[in-house]
């Protein structure tokens, strides 16, 4: 009878670190952290697109993939890869505003500007994937059918086309310059300006904090743009197929793996919170 009167639970409550309020007081809704959230989504998505098929390829000598699946993978690689490039450019502008104009930062990087930058990054990534995938899929593929790569990257798939791809290669090269090199050069110019501002800071603590914020983004940009430009801007005979595979792995899997470590280890707020958590844990174990 008592069992019948009990109501069934329809939800659970996750306590998380409720015993450590200092971990929940971080300002995780400022643009910097919101940019990092979008970058994390992109990194996880790139790995999810490439990793499952790659594991199958590595465990078997030869693995078949359907035409539709190959071009779907190709589309999402371009979509998320392009979005990441634009996001890193937007994050460079965010760091530039935060370090060079700290008092005006809330006005410069307000919610409206932030939404424009994020929406624009995802939209441009979507357009990149759609245009390139649609164009390449229109080429005839009459053999051979072996892609000498671990995934359906555009350069590897394009080598199997049975048509003149010169016009597309010109478009792809120009697009790569605009998507990778132009944002990269703008980021470098903003970094030079940031470096001068940091060196002029009278406080050593201020310089260290600003440099820590700047260095994490610089490391991520170097990994992403460096390896991607080597892959997509190289001549056809520039590197061996094995070297191309390793380059592809570095920006599609290594970079998403390292980004969380780069940003978390360089973030002073997160480090302080982890140190407090560790000390609290040690104290509780002692008693």
Image (tube, rainbow, N blue to C red):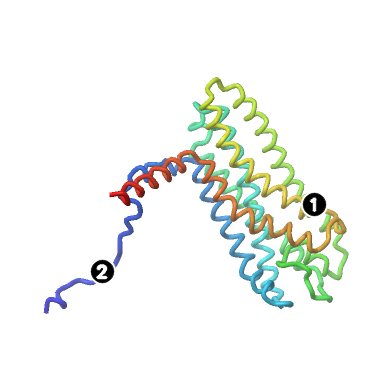
x and y percent of residue 37 in the render?
51, 50
Alpha-carbon neighbours of circle 2 within 10 Å: few (<14), some, or many (≥20)? few
User: Which residue is drawn at the image coordinates 72% and 67% (left, top)?
Assistant: 150
Q: CA–CA distance between discs 2 and 1?
A: 57 Å
Q: Name the outermost residue toward the bottom.
A: 1
Instruction: Identify which residue is drawn at 51% across, 28% down.
Output: 102
In percent of width and height, residue 126 lies at 63, 56
Residue in the foreground of this view, choosing between 30 and 150: 150
- Residue 233: give its label: 1
Query: Going by the picture, which residue comes out furthest to the front?
Result: 286
Residue at x 34% of width, y 46% of height = 280
In this view, the residue in front, 233 or 127, is 233
Residue 58 drawn at (x, y percent): 68, 72
Residue 9: which numbered mark, if any?
A: 2
Q: Residue furthest left?
A: 1
| Quadrant of the rendering where the N terminus is positioned | bottom left
Residues at discs 2 and 1 in contact (Cβ within 8 Å): no
Name the residue: 80% across, 75% down.
145
Residue 257 appears left or right of 277? right
How many numbered marks, from 0 up?
Answer: 2
Residue 65 position by quadrant = bottom right
């Amino acid at each position: 009878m008592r069992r019948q009167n009990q109501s069934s639970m329809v939800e659970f409550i996750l306590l998380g670190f409720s015993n450590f309020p200092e971990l929940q007081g971080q300002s995780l809704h400022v643009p910097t952290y919101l940019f990092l959230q979008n970058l994390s989504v992109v990194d996880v998505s790139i790995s999810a697109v490439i990793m499952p098929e790659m594991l199958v390829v590595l465990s078997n000598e030869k693995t078949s993939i359907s035409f539709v699946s190959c071009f779907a993978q190709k589309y999402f690689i371009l979509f998320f890869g392009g979005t990441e490039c634009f996001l890193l450019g937007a994050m460079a502008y965010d760091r530039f505003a935060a370090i060079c104009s700290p008092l005006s930062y809330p006005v410069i990087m307000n919610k409206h500007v932030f939404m424009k930058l994020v929406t624009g990054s995802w939209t441009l990534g979507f357009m990149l994937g759609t245009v390139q995938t649609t164009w390449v899929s229109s080429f005839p593929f009459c053999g051979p059918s072996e892609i000498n790569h671990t995934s359906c990257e555009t350069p590897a798939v394009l080598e199997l086309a049975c048509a003149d791809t010169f016009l597309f290669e010109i478009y792809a090269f120009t697009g790569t310059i605009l998507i990778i090199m132009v944002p990269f050069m703008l980021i470098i110019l903003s970094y030079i300006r940031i470096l001068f501002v940091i060196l002029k800071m009278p406080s050593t603590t201020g310089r260290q904090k600003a440099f820590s914020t700047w260095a994490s983004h610089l490391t991520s940009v170097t990994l992403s743009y460096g390896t991607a430009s080597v892959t997509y801007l190289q001549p056809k005979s520039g590197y061996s197929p094995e070297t191309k595979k390793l380059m592809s792995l570095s920006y599609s899997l290594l970079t998403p793996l390292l980004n969380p470590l780069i940003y978390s280890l360089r973030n002073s707020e997160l480090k302080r919170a982890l140190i407090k958590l560790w000390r609290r844990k040690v104290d509780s174990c002692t008693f």
